[in-house]
Image (cartoon, helix red, strand yellow):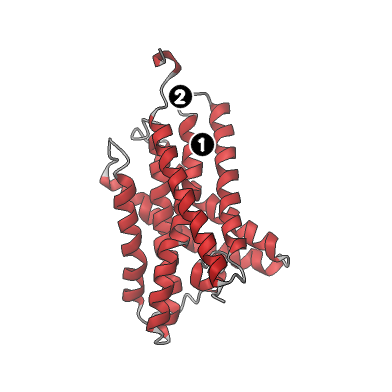
Amino acid sequence: MPSCDIIHGEGHLKDVDLNTNTSLVYALLAGILPSLIWLIFWLREDANPEPRLLVILLFVGGMVGVAAAIVAERYTGDIISNGQLRFTVWAAIEEGIKFLVVAVIALNTDFNDEPIDAMMYCIVAALGFSALENALFIMQPLSTGAIAQSIIEGNMRFVGATLVHIVSSACVGFGLGMAFYRGYLAKAVGLVIGLGAAISLHAAFNLSIINTSSLDTLKVFGWVWAAVVVLIVLFEEIKSVRPKTLVP
């Protein structure tokens, strides 16, 4: 049965050896390039592209967030013995960190001027987070010469972990975007609902790939791709959000 680390790795950031430097460049390339591919794909959904500097800051901010997640997950991993609770807490930590990156860097800028922007910001930060996270996990087999394993792990994370980060974070952005033209209370409710959905989705994926068979793994990937289809639909929905005064 495939291991949780190979398929996804969520909740195992605390086990990453930060002192490993063998094949660092290759691992970074293997982790970052797939995220850049996804970044180009999703940025095409925005008819009014965001400034490149803002996109870069969000991507790098997401990468920096991995360090905070490692510390938090190591701490909580030592004090939470229940496996399901631990994976859920780790999902909450990562979703919370990614949102904080977006809140600090982008939400209060003049560039956040349409409902779709929050979704785009959350996705970019998620891709930055996923890029470094993937690189760290790929670096482990590379450092021991397990080239084949690193290739398999890279491909699996490109399909699994990265997509989960994208869809989960997009839920947060969608919640904010739907309340874009409303007051602070509505935005707070949208944020809570979005974060709740993101954590639930993220935790469900974490738990679903523990000790799964190959067939079950394919099923998990199936519902991840289904979630991506839903995300595309949500993009179309968020594009239709207008101020109430403009509604005929």
Q: Which image quarter: residue 189?
A: top right
**Label 2 neighbourhood size at 10 Å, few (<14), some (14-19), many (20+)?**
some
**Which numbered tag is attached to residue 175?**
1
Name the amino acid, label 1.
Answer: Gly
Q: Position of residue 146 (x, y in %)?
A: 41, 85
**Residue with the most extreme front position:** 215
| Mark with earlier residue (2, 1) | 1
Q: Is residue 105 visible?
A: no
Visible in this render: residue 130?
yes
**Residue 89 versus residue 83 in the image, above or below:** above
Q: Is residue 80 left or right of residue 93?
A: right
Horizontal and vertical percent for residue 140? 45, 79
Q: Is residue 109 above or below residue 40?
A: above
Residue found 39% across the figure and 79% down from its top: 21
- Taking depth in this image into account, of 222 and 190 the one nearest to the observer is 222
Q: For this view, does 190 lie left or right of residue 79?
A: left
Q: Could you say where residue 191 lies in the image, as x and y percent from the top left?
A: 55, 38
Q: List the residue tagged with mark 2.
A: 181
| Disc ID at residue 234 | none
Q: Residue furthest bottom?
A: 145
Q: Residue 217 at x, y = what percent?
A: 53, 66
